Amino acid sequence: LIKQTGPILLDESIEQDYLSAVKQAIESDADNRIADFHIWKVGANHYAAIISIVTHNLRPTGHYRDLLHGFDRLAHITIEINQCQDQACNQ
């Protein structure tokens, strides 16, 4: 039981390359930076994700979902967008 649930509880249930690709897709658009990111398994090959984004250029939530359209394993995505009020947010 510990072997099966441990990786889920520690956000290690998906490959690092996949996580890096998701991060790159978000951060390559405008000046977006991911402040917090959690992903966990919810089905055989389906994952849920919570992504907190900091940016100067606020866009509708749908815009950020569109950036992830090629990630077919992300079945449930929650996106939080925080507007950066000064230059220090994205450093």
Image (cartoon, helix red, strand yellow):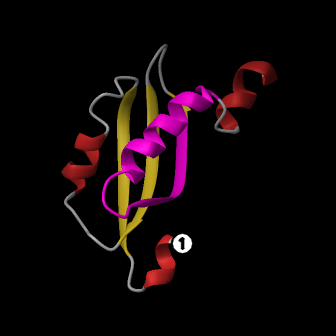
Give the percent coordinates (x, y) of residue 10. 70, 39
Q: Quadrant of the C terminus?
A: bottom right
For the residue labelled by badge 1, is the local secondary structure a helix, a strand or a loop?
Answer: loop
Q: Nearer the viewer, residue 41 or 66?
A: 66
Residue 49 drawn at (x, y percent): 45, 41
What is the magenta range? 13-39
Residue drawn at x 39%, y 30% is 74
Residue 17 on the magenta segment: yes
Quarter of image, res 87: bottom left
Is 2 left, or right, of 31 in this rendering? right
Q: Is 6 drawn above or below residue 27 in the view shown?
A: above
Is 91 rendered above or below residue 34?
A: below
Please identify the quarter of the rendering in which residue 59 is found.
bottom left
- Quadrant of the rendered image containing residue 54: bottom left
Q: Amino acid at mark 1?
A: Gln
Q: Is residue 32 left or right of residue 14?
A: left
In this picture, residue 34 sits left or right of residue 77? right
Q: Which residue bears the numbered disc 1?
A: 91
68 up-or-down from 91: above or below: above
Q: In this view, which residue lies farthest toward the top?
A: 44
